[in-house]
Amino acid sequence: MAHLRRRFAAFTAALVMSLTSGTVASPAFAHPTEPDKTATARGYGGAVSTVDPEASAAALRVLRKGGNAVDAAVAAAATLGVTEPYSAGIGGGGYFMFYDAETGEVSSIDGRETAPEAMPHDAFIDPETGEPYPFTPELVTSGVSVGVPGTPATWERALDRWGTVSLREALKPAIKVASRGFEVDETFRQQTLDNKIRFEAFTSTTSLFLPDGDAPAVGSTFKNHDLAKTYRLLAKHGTDAFYDGPLAEEIAATVQDPPKTDTTKLPVPVGHMTTADLAEYEALDQDPAHVEYRGLDVYGMAPSSSGGTTVGEALNILDTVNLSEMTVPGALHHYLEASALAFADRGKYVGDPAFVDVPTDALTDPLFGKERACHIDPLQAAEKPVTPGDVSEYDGVCPAAAAAPADEKDTENISTTNLTVADRWGNVVEYTLTIEQTGGSGIVVPGRGFLLNNELTDFSTVYDPADPNRIEPGKRPRSSMSPTIILEDGEPFLALGSPGGSTIITTVLQTILNRVDLGMDIPEAIAAPRASQRNTASVTAEPKFIDAYESQLKPYGHELSPAGDSFTSAAEIGAATAIEFMSDGSMVAAAEPVRRGGGSALVLKPSR
Ligand code: GLU
């Protein structure tokens, strides 16, 4: 695959500039603290891409001071907890992937939230009606959907395993941003407004995020002294101060008895978390899922996330055809069909491997992918939902045996954040972290400055013993987070990831195809309009995708429907970040030019 890099070796800094000019979001007015925001940067000695200029700047400072990619990733993640508090923070969880330049190995940490030990199978059934709680607003704004947070433990574990600085050091930039404040942008204000009814349900959340009864104004400075204090506590005492002691007691009490306002009409079902659940939480070392695609080694997050197996299976399916020789609609048709097939298997087989026998090897087996590829008609979209394959019996020969379909309802929300960091030694981090939907459960732990997740809504709502994603005490709900690191001949070629609930999987997949098969460079691959087929009757797509491809995909039988829902105002899919490693030793850091107001890509040295 060396040709891939050669093909793009001519990719010049000038080209990058021309690609991004006009799309780089520049602030309408200067703010004393706001770092520059550019969507693409090419250079040497280290690179970072996040959705936020403060977070990218924090990571870059750590790299400049001699920290490695892990140190910088934790600094960036902690800063995102300040500037993107509705997407990520210490009240949530995530998945951390690391390429170690010294050993050439890719490793990962599963920092997913867990269900409390006292969570019953029928936790999502309203005892008053005997029916499942309506998903919105009851379940999403509740104590019952709060999982034991994994993010503090993930940071500590990553620093212990691979970092060179202490947690105290890594938290410094975030503490500074929380104390001195950051500039409120359109996205922050809009996300606050989107959550107004939920935030108004809690005294703690109202006083933090709706200080005068309104979302902070665009251009104003938002400070979070409570979070600065909480970070200082962790800096001083380590994460024991989170999982044990007064803060753990407050978290458990908040989940069991959320601080509701007198005026709210939201029911807010209470949760089951105890201090013992917090004390027992562990971020898990996990072997990544691996597939080969066009000779590249693709490493993704193994279950409890479905990201690695689903992206991997779709790639295995697509490895049986040559997308680059197809017309663009033909290639897109194959992308959509492969994704639907992989989603059928995800629904049938993937859950927390501590509770479910997940056939990760079969799902990522090229033979299984080959057999699943038999179900793609090159000219006609299959009727959806397609049935899953049979992992107990496959030989790569058509036709594949079908298994009974899973009864699936996609309730994953579209929030979360993703970051990519590389350092001068060649180490790479890809990290996706979340509090589930934008604004999480809506509940701020009083006086502590952070929101609790509502990640347990990622479990299936109704308990079915045959469902791998059924609720179990102590279990991790299935995720879609797909931090991905791709090696070429053992060296980093591309690292990427995205937020977006179950569309994370398709965003990562589509971006890989854009880059590897469809002749785009990485900034173009990220900027390109997106569509997401998750084994449903119609394909969710961004307006620009619909404009460009609707008429060309119609003859195949694909129906496109616009992305976005009644809750969020944005008709966008994902907010990716990536770094590509070029053959001349440079790195191209790429963030979104437009989605979510544009991300921030930085490099340590623009020239050698
Ligand atoms: N809960 C989702 C997951 O774990 C992430 C939420 C999101 O991206 O919005 O896959």
Image (cartoon, helix red, strand yellow):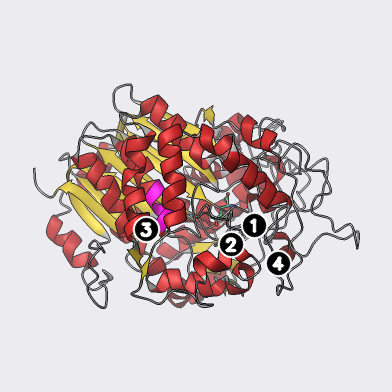
Considering only order in the chain, which callout, 1 or 4, is on the residue closer to the N terminus?
4
Image location of residue 157, percent across then percent down: 46, 30
Q: CA distance from mark 3 to mark 1?
A: 29 Å
- Disc 4 residue type (three-letter): Thr
Residue pictured at 35% horizontal, 31% vertical:
166
Residue 51's mark? Answer: 3
Question: Relative to 233, is 516 on the left or the right?
Answer: left
Residue at 72% of width from left, 71% of height from top?
A: 262
Decide which of tag 1 and tag 2 comes sooner along the chain.
Answer: 2
Quarter-of-image position of residue 307: top right
Answer whether labels 3 and 4 touch (C-beta < 8 Å): no
Q: Is mark 2 within 8 Å of ligand 1?
A: no
Residue assigned mark 1: 535
- Residue type, label 1: Asn
Where residue 413 appears, as percent x and y from the top left, is: 60, 60
Residue 76 vs residue 318: left or right?
left
Q: Circle 3: is it few (<14), some (14-19), or many (20+) Cα within 10 Å?
A: many
- The answer for how far apart the CA atoms under marks 4 and 2 are is 21 Å
How far apart marks 2 and 3 lie (CA) works out to 26 Å
Q: Nearer the viewer, residue 217 or 395?
A: 217
- Tag shown at residue 136: 4
Distance from disc 3 to disc 4, alpha carbons, whole Å, reads: 27 Å
Q: Comparing marks 4 and 1, which lies closer to the viewer?
A: 4
Indicate whether residue 91 is drawn in magenta: no
Q: Residues within 10 Å of mark 2 (few under 14, many from 20)?
A: many
- Magenta residues, as a range? 78-82
Residue that lies at the very extreme toward the top in this rendered image: 103
| The one of 580 and 93 positioned closer to us in this rendering | 93
Q: Which residue is mark 2?
A: 204
Which amino acid type is shown beneath numbered disc 3? Answer: Val
Specify the quadrant that holds the N terminus.
top left
Q: Tell which circle, 3 or 1, labels the residue nearer the N-terminal end.
A: 3
